[in-house]
């Protein structure tokens, strides 16, 4: 199967242009920072414009020259604290103007539509967030489950190959 490789800045410029016209944009996800709620290379995220920001919203934002998708942990005026679901410690602090889009839906396996703000989804996230002190251990176990282990290994090898290709 062939794949098309597009520069990240060009890709997100087209996504933001689509959003500025009032349309939604569906993007693939890379990286493991939103595990277990969003799975890289398996799930798609439907993005929409940012009309209102609340805690627990999943947002696309610009951070250190890169586009990142994580969840809002707290909002204090213009300052927003964001953290990935699959990240045990690191938090990003950005301003509202750094936030480009908000997730409207997650397409599990690229097909089954899931509302990330349903009562069940938010309840699951609350339970997950309360496990923050032991989250790194739980993620270690999750990544080694038989149905995840080989997929995650393949994804991390592909990411390393892609990173090496970028440096050449």
Image: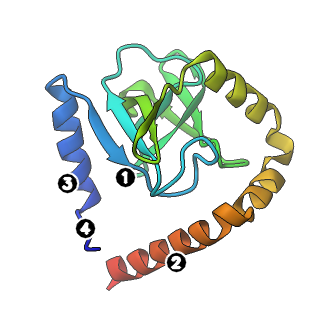
Q: Is residue 79 left or right of residue 50?
A: right
Circles 3 and 2 in contact, beta carbons < 8 Å: no
* For discs 4 and 1, the disc positioned in front in the rendered view: 4
The residue sitting at 25% across, 73% down in the picture is 2
Marks 2 and 4 sit apart, C-alpha to C-alpha, by: 16 Å
Q: Earlier in the sequence, mark 3 or mark 1?
A: 3
Disc 3 secondary structure class: helix
Q: Is residue 107 left or right of residue 156?
A: left
Residue 3 image point, x, y percent: 26, 69
Q: Quadrant of residue 24?
A: top left
* For discs 4 and 3, the disc positioned in front in the rendered view: 4
Q: Quadrant of residue 147?
A: bottom right
The residue sitting at 40% across, 46% down in the picture is 110
- Tell me if I can see residue 98 in this picture: yes
Check disc 2: other Cα within 10 Å, few if <14, some if 14-19, many if 20+. Answer: few
Q: Is residue 17 above or below residue 96?
A: below
Q: Earlier in the sequence, mark 2 or mark 4?
A: 4
Q: Which mark is residue 163?
A: none
The residue under label 1 is 65
Circles 4 and 1 in contact, beta carbons < 8 Å: no
Disc 4 secondary structure class: loop
Disc 1 secondary structure class: loop
Residue 80 image point, x, y percent: 53, 27
The residue under label 2 is 157
Q: Is residue 2 left or right of residue 66?
A: left
Marks 3 and 1 sit apart, C-alpha to C-alpha, by: 13 Å
Residue 11 image point, x, y percent: 23, 52
Q: Earlier in the sequence, mark 3 or mark 2?
A: 3
């Amino acid at each position: 199967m062939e794949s098309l490789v597009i520069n990240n800045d060009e890709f997100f410029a087209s996504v933001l242009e689509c959003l500025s016209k009032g349309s939604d944009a569906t993007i693939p996800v890379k990286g493991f920072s939103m595990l277990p709620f969003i799975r890289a290379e398996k799930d798609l995220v439907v993005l929409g414009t940012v009309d209102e920001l609340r805690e627990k919203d999943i947002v696309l934002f610009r951070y250190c020259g890169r586009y990142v998708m994580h969840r809002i942990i707290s909002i204090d005026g213009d300052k927003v604290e964001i953290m990935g679901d699959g990240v045990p410690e690191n938090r990003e602090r950005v301003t509202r103007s750094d936030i480009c889009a908000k997730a409207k839906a997650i397409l599990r396996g690229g097909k089954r539509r899931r509302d990330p703000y349903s009562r069940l989804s938010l309840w699951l996230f609350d339970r997950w967030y309360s496990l923050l002190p032991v989250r790194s251990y739980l993620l270690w176990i999750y990544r080694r489950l038989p149905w995840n282990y080989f997929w995650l290994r393949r994804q991390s090898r592909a990411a390393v190959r892609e990173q090496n290709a970028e440096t050449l």
